[in-house]
Amino acid sequence: MNEPTRQHARQRLDDRLGRLNPVERFKEPPKGWIKAIREALGMTGVQFAQRLGVRPQTADALERSEATGVIKLATLRRAAEALDCTLVYALVPKTPLERTVNDRARAIAIRDLGRVSHSMKLEAQGTGDADLEARIEAYIRDTLTERDLWRPL
């Protein structure tokens, strides 16, 4: 995937996922979504187990595994169906993807240009900080590739 296509994909994802922020609105109840919805529906654990086609002990273990965060996604999907719900699954970035990429590129450029600047200062060929921003932008544009961004710093 080329850079303009990847940038467009990031922007589309940012638009879609931005609607989910703030994620606190979707924080799971302390006892988990399954048990909270089951109880709100007035469904007993035995009835839930029957709808799942499992023993009541298994349904109880399933609820506990969701509350502790160890449930498998496929199991959660089955539980949602048994409760006549739709499972919504998303990874919501803490910051927009485009900003994450730009911040990472900037950090790499500053690191790399800092090394060059240090070497030049040692050789008495220092450059002024006045054009630092322009050099950072040029470095990002002309030197960095997407593959460079996620190598360890």
Image: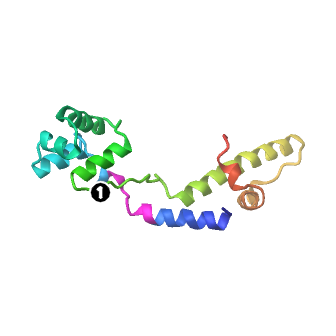
What residue did someone put label 1 on?
Answer: 86
- Quadrant where the image shows the C terminus: top right
Name the image quarter holding residue 143.
bottom right
Query: Is residue 88 shown above or below 3?
Result: above
Q: Residue at x 81, y 46 (%)?
A: 116
Query: Is residue 141 shown above or below 119?
Result: below
Q: Residue at x 29, y 57 (%)?
A: 86
The spot of residue 80 in percent (x, y) is 27, 51
- Quadrant where the image shows the N terminus: bottom right
Q: Residue at x 84, y 49 (%)?
A: 126
Mark 1 falls on what kind of element? loop
Residue type at numbered disc 1: Thr
Observer-nearest of 119 and 30: 30
The answer to whether residue 150 is left or right of residue 14 is right
Disc 1 packing (10 Å; few <14; some 14–19; many ≥20):
few
Q: Which residues are magenta?
A: 16-24
The answer to whether residue 54 is left or right of residue 127 is left
The spot of residue 8 in percent (x, y) is 58, 68
Observer-nearest of 152 and 53: 53
Query: Is residue 58 shown above or below 149?
Result: above
The spot of residue 105 in percent (x, y) is 66, 53
Membership of 35 in magenta stretch = no
The answer to whether residue 30 is left or right of residue 127 is left
Observer-nearest of 125 and 3: 3
